[in-house]
Amino acid sequence: MQKYLTQLIADIQVAKEDMLPPWIPKASYELDEWLPTDEDEQQAPKRSVEDWTGIKQEMLPPPEHLTEEQAATLLKVLEELLSEINCHWVTQIKVPVYLQYATIRRRWQQEHAWLMWHENFFDYCEEGQIHGSCGFGMEYCHCRFFAEMSKDWDKTPWTEEDETRLLEELEERRQRRKRDDWW
């Protein structure tokens, strides 16, 4: 397996070096050429990660055939390759390496828009996936983690009266500090 991984990593490095964006880069851009996120997403060319990179899913060995060290090495080079197509791999909570690699491998054929102006990210869950059926499993489910973290947050909408009250309170504090030389 190590010989195969060495060759695969070399192939990934070549793919990175041969990577060209789907537009002709210019030395500089004018401010009016910048696009807001929604327009950037609409005009961005879309292909599967496989097609952008030239690395096919079947080239990536099943995670159960890898040691932890091999999975970590492969995960690192795949993250670098994904970054080349502006498809960043980001996890918000700590997820074991083997599970991250398995998820990248499983989702490798996803369609990806190569944005010109904004960051884009690798989707580790299927679009429309039912909450609680995360690609990372329940223990590392990001949706569940953030839902639990925010469940007790105050859901009361912020009103104009709240804004006015806050600004008045801040101004009153500022005036009090100014009067009392309160530093």
Image (spheres, rainbow, N blue to C red):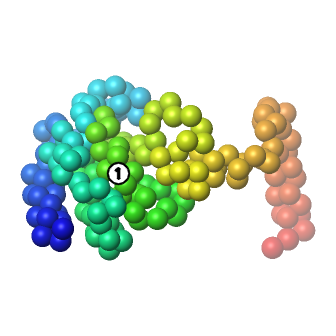
User: Toward which corner of the image does residue 40 lie, by quadrant?
Assistant: top left
Q: Position of residue 60 (x, y in %)?
A: 23, 54
Quarter of the figure that contains the N terminus = bottom left
Residue drawn at x 36%, y 71% as measured from the top left: 68
Residue drawn at x 13%, y 39% as measured from the top left: 24
Local SS, label 1 = helix
Asked if one can make out residue 155 in the rendered structure from this viewpoint, the answer is yes
Q: Position of residue 174 (x, y in %)?
A: 82, 58
Residue drawn at x 75%, y 46% as measured from the top left: 151
Crowding around mark 1 (Cα neighbors within 10 Å: few <14, some 14 to 19, many 20+) is many
Does residue 10 lie above or below 112 as drawn?
below
Q: Position of residue 182 (x, y in %)?
A: 85, 71
Query: How many numbered discs?
Result: 1
Residue drawn at x 81%, y 73% as measured from the top left: 183
Q: Position of residue 116 (x, y in %)?
A: 28, 39
Asked if one can make out residue 33 in the rendered structure from this viewpoint, the answer is no
Does residue 119 lie above or below 179 as drawn?
above
Does residue 133 lie above or below 47 as drawn?
below
Which residue is more in the foreground, 124 or 68?
Answer: 68
Does residue 28 lie above or below 78 as drawn?
above
Instruction: Look at mark 1 in the image and give the residue it sits on.
Output: 104
Type of the residue with mark 1? Ile
Q: Is 158 left or right of 142, judged from the image as shown?
A: right
Q: Is 26 left or right of 157, judged from the image as shown?
A: left
